[in-house]
């Protein structure tokens, strides 16, 4: 079984709709992240959370919100979807080691906003 | 401002030869560098990393070299195999940066038979 899972894997929605992308992990990691990938732009950080009570904005948080429901669950919401939010969305986890950490990614959610 | 750059969008190599993927960075505060590999319809998979206190790290067929003075790192794959065909992302983080990764734009590697 995958350590980091994302649902749904694919989603088509219309402009103005609210949608939620979910991420679950069985790695037992405290830290979780949401990224988006656009063609030619690599991955960019949307939000991150170092524990259940900690939420931080990333590089491109406008138009998004998150919820850390438990150590294992981190959800990303688009309150009112717009076409330029069409992208691949990835969730990642890591464990604080006191030094440099490696992030582990889920399989991604492909979102199309019409 | 692209702090991590992969200037080659694609690379084609013959099976058995060496693949060299390059990455440049501009932020001198970065102290940890990672390479991720990504197949279509999958998430990025961690491949290899290097700390700024080293100039080389090796793991099987994969070696990463770091040249801090040039702010340049490279990933060598020897010998290249068809299964290595994927997009390779370079990423960097810095002390005090909360483990936030800054990614390059990726290089599509194609290993041909």
Image (cartoon, rainbow, N blue to C red):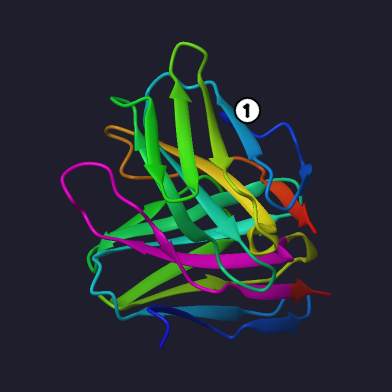
Q: Quick check: B85 above or below B4?
A: below
Residue A48 in view of the camera: yes
> Relative to residue B47, is residue A52 depicted above or below?
below
Dot 1 crowding, Cα within 10 Å, few <14, some 14–19, many 20+: few
Name the outermost residue toward the front: B16
- What x and y, as percent, mark residue A26? 30, 81
Secondary structure of the residue carrying tag 1 is loop
As drawn, A74 above or below B18: below
Q: Is residue B103 visible?
A: no
The residue indicated by pointer 1 is B1
Please tell me whether residue B2 belongs to the stretch shown in magenta.
no
In the rendered view, does A56 fall on the left or right side of B6? left
* Residue B15: percent from left, percent from top: 72, 53
Residue B17 in the image: x percent, y percent?
Answer: 69, 44
Taking the spot 49% from the left edge, 46% from the top edge, the residue there is: B62
* Furthest residue in direction left, as rendered: A98
Is A106 in the magenta?
yes
The region drawn magenta spans A85-111
Q: Residue at x 60, y 72 (%)?
A: B42
Foreground pick, B9 / B66: B66
Which chain does the residue under circle 1 lie in?
Answer: B
* Residue shown at 64% from the left, 51% from the top: B80
Q: Residue at x 54, y 66 (%)?
A: A90
Q: Is residue B19 left or right of residue A22?
A: right
- In the displayed structure, does residue B10 sit left or right of residue B48? right
Name the image quarter holding the N terminus of chain B: top right
Which residue is situated farthest in the top direction here? B69
Left-right relation of B29 to A90: left
Callout count:
1
């Amino acid at each position: 079984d995958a350590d980091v899972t994302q649902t749904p894997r694919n989603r088509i929605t219309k402009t103005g709709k609210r949608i939620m992308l979910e991420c679950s992990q069985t790695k037992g990691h405290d830290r979780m992240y949401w990224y988006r990938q656009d063609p030619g732009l690599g991955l960019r950080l949307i939000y991150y959370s170092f524990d259940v009570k900690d939420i931080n904005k990333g590089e491109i948080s406008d138009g998004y919100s998150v919820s850390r429901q438990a150590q294992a669950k981190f959800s990303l919401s688009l309150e009112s979807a717009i076409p330029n939010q069409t992208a691949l969305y990835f969730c990642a986890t890591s464990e604080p080691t006191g030094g440099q950490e490696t992030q582990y990614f889920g399989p991604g959610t492909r979102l199309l906003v019409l | 401002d692209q702090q991590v750059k992969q200037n080659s969008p694609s690379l084609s190599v013959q099976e058995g030869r060496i693949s060299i993927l390059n990455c440049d960075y501009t932020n001198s505060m970065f102290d940890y560098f990672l390479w991720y590999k990504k197949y279509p319809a999958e998430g990025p998979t961690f491949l290899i990393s290097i700390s700024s206190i080293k100039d080389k790290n090796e793991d099987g067929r994969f070696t990463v070299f770091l040249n801090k003075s040039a702010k340049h790192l490279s990933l060598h794959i020897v010998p290249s195999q068809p299964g290595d065909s994927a997009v390779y992302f370079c990423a960097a983080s810095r002390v005090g940066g909360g483990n936030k990764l800054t990614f390059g734009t990726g290089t599509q590697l194609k290993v041909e038979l």
